[in-house]
Amino acid sequence: MRIAINISRFKQDFDAMSLIGRTAEGGASRLAFSPQEQIAREFVKQKLYEAGLNPFMDPSGNLHGRRLGVEPGPAVAAGSHSDSVENGGHFDGVVGLLGAIEVMRSINDAGIQTRRSLEVISFLSEEPNRFGISCFGSRALCGKMDRALLYGRSDIKGETLSAALSSIGVSAQEIIGLNPEEYKYNAFVELHVEQGRMLYDSKIPLGLVTEIVGAYRYKVTFKGQADHSGGTPMNSRRDALAAAAEAILAVERTCRKYQDKDIVGTVGVIHVSPGAINVIPGECDIIIEVRGSTHFPKSTPVAEIKEAIQNTARQRKVEVNIETLMEDESRSVSPRVLQALEQGAAELGYPCLRMPSRTGHDALHMAELSEVGMIFLPSREGVGHHPSEWTDMGDIEKGLQLLATTLVNLAGS
């Protein structure tokens, strides 16, 4: 079934969202818990109202909008997120979120009644927030947020996660008391831009995800001795930043060793104290991320990295602490949902490519509440998390048509 998508209406919403948190470089900065992201969430809520989807917020802070079916039971859902990384792109998350709303409007326009209810979900804080947690809303909905984390995790300024949640009207206590069984779905489909080169290079408009990679993240703190940079001989120094530099190179070296196993590693965050030109760094924090597929255990390179870090600390006579921020395992998607997506693409006559997702998504965690699937769209030059991130509207329209067809097929008409 081909459902006509009003791509002009979608683009109008997309352009409006692109103005929220727009940076001088033309990117988007809508960080979780920020005023800009709160404006974006209000915009999404208004669009859910306009689509007749009666929005509500669950205890985890996710926004929902439901289109009732004729039968009770678990809904078929779609959605993504509105937050961004610092100075990121405009397509990440937003295409899948506003696209899901447009799909609901287009199904309404077509006068289609489904057996199962259809639902849009806007997840809270999909991008890594200042507390080192990504996919917060979907994790919390699955019951993965405990009291120790909610009340004990703090940012570099000392604000707790629970306080940040309270500032946007979300109660940590309600998250603790949440029952994930109340949020089971028949199926969940997330539409997202690829943020990689596979579709762009192959010139295929649609990717059907077969597995979603998990990520391991660790906060590593080195404590040495802050001292005068002029008065301290080189062989007497306990330089925390120098130790961190060796650790960063160990991450790169180890992950290159395993690159044929689809292992990648990154250190994208570093904090140095006291941060003065003429003072030897006494303390340094870095955050390490290691990603990999289901075909090779991430624990193998991670163990080697941790051993290298401990060796560096001993050699440089600094203290080190390694804190686990998250360890997400990779997941395969639902065969039933993947088959429904392939059937929909065949009905529409669109070529598609089976492919892994090398980036993390809320669908990874929603797999604990639902059978899941994902649609990828081409990213120009494979660019993601950057102001130049771009996906053609023609490809977005194809993705929305596939999403609409698949949701209706899964929900039954």
Image (spheres, grey):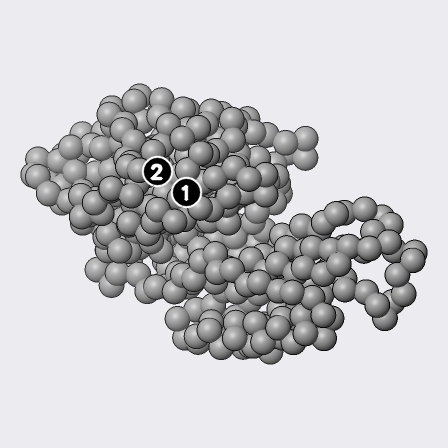
Q: Position of residue 394 (x, y in %)?
A: 45, 41
Residue at 34% over, 49% down = 146
Q: Are marks 1 and 2 in contact (CB under 8 Å)?
A: yes
The amino acid sitting under disc 2 is Ala
Residue occupying the point 16% across, 38% down: 117
Within-10-Å neighbours for mark 2: few <14, some 14–19, many 20+: many
Amino acid under disc 1: Tyr
Image height check: is 362 above or below 327? above
Residue that mark 1 sits on = 151
Given residues 237 and 137, the one toward you in this image is 237
Q: Secondary structure at mark 2?
A: helix
Q: Is residue 89 visible?
A: no
* Residue 246 rendering spot, x and y as whole percentages: 71, 68
Give the spatial CA distance, label 1 vs label 2. Answer: 8 Å
The answer to which image quadrant residue 207 occupies is bottom left
Viewer-proximal residue, 194 or 57? 57
- Confirm whether residue 238 shows in the render: yes
Name the residue at 52% across, 28% down. Answer: 36
Residue bearing mark 2? 172
